[in-house]
Image (cartoon, helix red, strand yellow):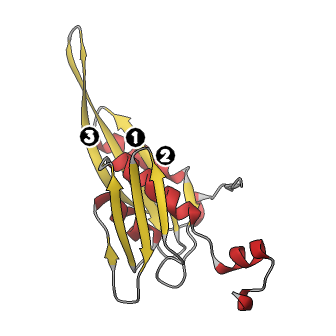
């Protein structure tokens, strides 16, 4: 089953950015060491359940963050939610990183660590239980979280796939 991802226009949303990780990178060259910075950024509009991630590299931190935000705006995805939580349990994978997302009752809050928390709050998920398994690398964790979010299906999709009405489910 192939999933067609349609392009989402970043200008029509009120996107808020959140820096997940900043990494100082050094390249050793003949004349010494060249230092630069890599930033991993998540942007999202909680009201409309849209979220994206991107990374940027530059000689200074602010430019790296700016590049990360621009990259994240180009790679937005819409998240299927039911009221304040996710519709069903899902496991996302990327590399050796795995992220388990589990729906939670009202009032639970976002139970998540670093990179997963940034994605969940940016996406507008208010109640969710998460567990990050495998790699603690923030790049892999974020990509695994996005894999999980893309797998989420709402009741209308499931009903259509099974040839039933929403009331029958």
The outermost residue toward the right is 163
**Horizontal relation, residue 59 to residue 2: left or right:** left
Marker disc for residue 71? 2
Label 3 sits on a secondary structure element that is: strand
CB atoms of marks 1 and 2 within 8 Å: yes
Q: Where is residue 148 in the image (x, y as percent from the top left)?
A: 50, 61
Q: Where is residue 144 in the image (x, y as percent from the top left)?
A: 45, 54
Q: How far apart are marks 2 and 3 (CA)?
A: 17 Å
Label located before the other in sequence (1 or 3): 3
Marker disc for residue 163? none
For the C terminus, the image quarter is bottom right
The outermost residue toward the bottom is 167
Q: Which residue is drawn at 73% across and 90% down?
A: 168
The residue carrying mark 3 is 23
Label 2 sits on a secondary structure element that is: helix
Residue 15 in view here: no
Label located before the other in sequence (2 or 3): 3
Q: Which residue is drawn at 45% across and 74% down?
A: 124
Choose between 113 and 64: the one closer to the eye: 113
Instruction: Write down the quadrant of residue 162 in the picture.
Output: bottom right
**Horizontal relation, residue 144 to residue 24: left or right:** right
In this view, 80 is above or below 42: below
The residue carrying mark 1 is 56
- The local crowd at label 3, few if under 14, some if 14 to 19, many if 20 or more residues have their Cα within 10 Å, is few
Q: Closer to the camera: disc 2 or disc 3?
A: 3
Q: How far apart are marks 1 and 3 (CA)?
A: 10 Å
Residue 136 in view here: yes
Q: Where is residue 30 in the image (x, y as percent from the top left)?
A: 23, 7
- The local crowd at label 2, few if under 14, some if 14 to 19, many if 20 or more residues have their Cα within 10 Å, is many
């Amino acid at each position: 089953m192939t999933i067609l991802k349609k392009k989402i226009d970043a200008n029509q949303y009120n996107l808020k950015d959140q820096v997940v990780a900043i990494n100082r990178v050094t390249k050793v060259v003949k004349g010494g060491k060249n230092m630069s910075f890599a930033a991993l950024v998540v942007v999202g509009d909680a009201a409309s359940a849209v979220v994206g991630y991107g990374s940027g590299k530059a000689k200074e931190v602010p430019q790296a963050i700016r590049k990360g935000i621009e990259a994240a705006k180009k790679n937005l995805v819409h998240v299927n939610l039911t009221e304040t939580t996710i519709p069903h349990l899902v496991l996302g994978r990327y590399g050796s990183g795995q992220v388990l997302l589990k729906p939670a009752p009202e009032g639970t809050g976002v139970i998540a660590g670093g990179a997963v928390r940034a994605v969940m709050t940016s996406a507008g998920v208010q109640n969710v239980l998460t567990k990050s398994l495998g790699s603690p690398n923030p790049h892999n964790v974020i990509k695994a979280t996005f894999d999980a979010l893309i797998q989420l299906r709402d009741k209308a999709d499931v009903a259509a796939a099974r040839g039933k009405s929403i009331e029958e489910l």
